[in-house]
Amino acid sequence: MQTPVLQDTMAAVAAVDLTKVYGSGDTAVRALDGVTVGFARAQFTAIMGPSGSGKSTLMHCLAGLDTATSGQALLGGTDLTKQSDKVLTKVRRERIGFVFQAFNLLPQLTAAQNITLPLELAGRKPDHHLYAHLTETLGIVSRLDHRPGELSGGQQQRVALARALVSRPEVVFADEPTGNLDSRSGAEVLLFLRNSVRELGQTIVMVTHDPGAAAYADRVVLLADGRVAGEIDRPDTASVTDALQGLAAAR
Ligand SMILES: Nc1ncnc2c1ncn2[C@@H]1O[C@H](COP(=O)(O)OP(=O)(O)OP(=O)(O)O)[C@@H](O)[C@H]1O
Ligand SMILES: [Mg+2]
């Protein structure tokens, strides 16, 4: 089945009628219920919606971290739902960057080693210019020899951002990247993400609960009960807050 989203060459990532059912029988949960949505290249998109609406599930299926029940999860021309585990591991390593709420750095490695590990696993050498640009922009040059346990939360998340971007991935998926940060560190992370889209042409998809964080994005996609429930172009805090209240009222 050809759909507009498939033909949209601007989309770096797309879900086509994507469905994910956890469990079976009486206890089955339809976490995604026919989601069709595209994420444009060099755009910063926020995914929002109530707890349990399927935000993380959508991101995990699009990142090859979870397998969909039906539909397509497209990264460039690749349908991730058709790939073997071996290919998915390679795709995650070479074509996707991840930032998580809990940073997910390896505690025994230094910041520098954490940043370059995914590239090394992929048998690639870091681009020194980009590595220098990222670590300087993120203000972590003097922290590169430290282990995560010696860094603040904000610093750890900035290391995780450098790790996600240094491979020039086709897309960066960020699941509540500011969820564990104070407002100032959170704002720094969001500014960095937005500037990466503007200056490096990075494609970013971020899940957040915070309307203020979503206002840094170019576009907001709203999910409710595993379905796309709307979207906002050029969001600001007020328009996002209104849309979320509308979703809550409709339940
Ligand atoms: N591994 C799993 N097994 C069973 N059910 C799951 C699993 N993961 C998620 N679910 C269910 O799928 C639905 C969507 O979950 P998901 O984690 O995608 O929501 P979310 O929008 O990210 O929520 P939150 O904002 O709380 O992070 C929920 O009802 C959840 O309970
Ligand atoms: Mg979630």
Image: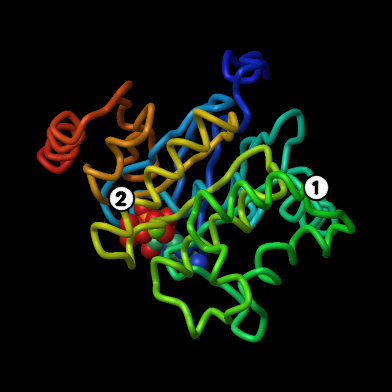
Quarter of the image for the C terminus: give it. top left
Relative side of 134 to 222, left or right:
right
Q: Which residue lies furthest to the front in this view?
A: 142
Relative side of 35 to 113, left or right:
left
Relative side of 20 to 76, left or right:
left
Residue 100 picture location, percent across and down: 48, 62
Residue at (73% x, 62% y) in the render = 116
- Under mark 1, the amino acid is Gln
Residue at (86% x, 54% y) in the render = 124
Residue 245 higher or lower than 1, as above or below:
below
Relative side of 71 to 55, left or right:
right
Quadrant containing ligand 2 reads bottom left
Residue 167 picture location, percent across and down: 72, 48
Total numbered labels placed on residues in the image: 2
Of 232 and 172, nearer the camera is 172
The quadrant holding residue 231 is: top left
Q: How far apart are marks 1 and 2 (CA)?
A: 37 Å
The quadrant holding residue 9 is: top right
Residue at (22% x, 43% y) in the render = 212
Of 230 and 150, nearer the camera is 150
Residue 118 picture location, percent across and down: 74, 61
- Check disc 2 and report the residue beneath it: 187
**Label of residue 83 in the image:** 1
Residue 105 picture location, percent across and down: 58, 73
